Image: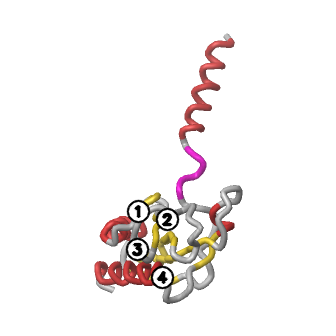
Amino acid sequence: MKRPFIILVLAGAAIVGSCGAGGVRPRYQPFAGSVSDTIPAPPDDVIRALELLVRAESLPLRQSSAREGYLETGWFNAETGRWGGGASLNTKEVARIRFWTDEVREGTSIVVGEAATRRIVDPSVADRETETRVPDGHAADSILRRVLDSLRARTGR
């Protein structure tokens, strides 16, 4: 009698464990001052289009989920375009870009984009706690705005 119960418990644990911790979209919000726009497309289409545009910029794609409406690049040097450098002490040039998108009405989404850099490099602290929005005119800010402009052109906005 114990054996079927144990099998059910183990099977249930395996199913719950395989579901993950809630996906890739973070719980935190974009930085104040992040850019946003309304796009005439559903969120999953917006993220898929952003994936193509980010790749066209030769940026490293760290994670993306069309279902969750989220995309994040890996760390890159915004001046040289080289990937990596998340642990670089050059906090002025190394950046990452994130996009959140949510449906505001059927077939229309709001997309918010941020370009972040690190204030400090401290592996003992969560990434987000070390980050700040790049200043206007920063190379990563220019890339972010170029991607959003391309998205607008692609969606006819």
What is the chief secondary structure element of the magenta stretch? loop
Viewer-proximal residue among 83 and 36: 83
- The first of marks 4 and 1 along the sequence is 1
Q: Is residue 129 left or right of residue 98?
A: right
Q: Amino acid at mark 1?
A: Pro
Looking at the image, do the residues carrying marks 4 and 3 touch, with CB atoms under 8 Å apart?
no
- Quadrant, the N terminus: top right
Q: Secondary structure at mark 2?
A: loop
Q: Are marks 2 and 1 in contact (CB under 8 Å)?
A: yes
* Residue occupying the point 47% across, 61% down: 84
- Residue type at the position of mark 2: Trp
> Disc 4 marks which residue?
141
Q: Secondary structure at mark 1?
A: loop
Residue 28 in sight in this render: yes
Question: Gap in Å between the C-alphas at discs 2 and 3?
Answer: 12 Å
Kind of residue at badge 4: Asp
Q: Is residue 128 above or below residue 111?
A: above
Real-space Cα separation, disc 2 to disc 1, in angstroms? 7 Å
Q: Residue 39: within the magenta?
A: no
Report whether 27 appears left or right of 68: right
Crowd tier of the residue under label 3, counting other residues whose Cα lies within 10 Å: few below 14, some 14–19, many 20 or above: few
Pointer 1 residue:
60
Q: Name the residue carrying label 2.
A: 75
Q: Position of residue 47 (x, y in %)?
A: 40, 67
Q: Which residues are magenta?
A: 20-24
User: Type of residue at label 3?
Assistant: Thr
Neighbor class of circle 4 (other Cα within 10 Å; few <14, some 14-19, many 20+) is many
Residue on which disc 3 sits: 80
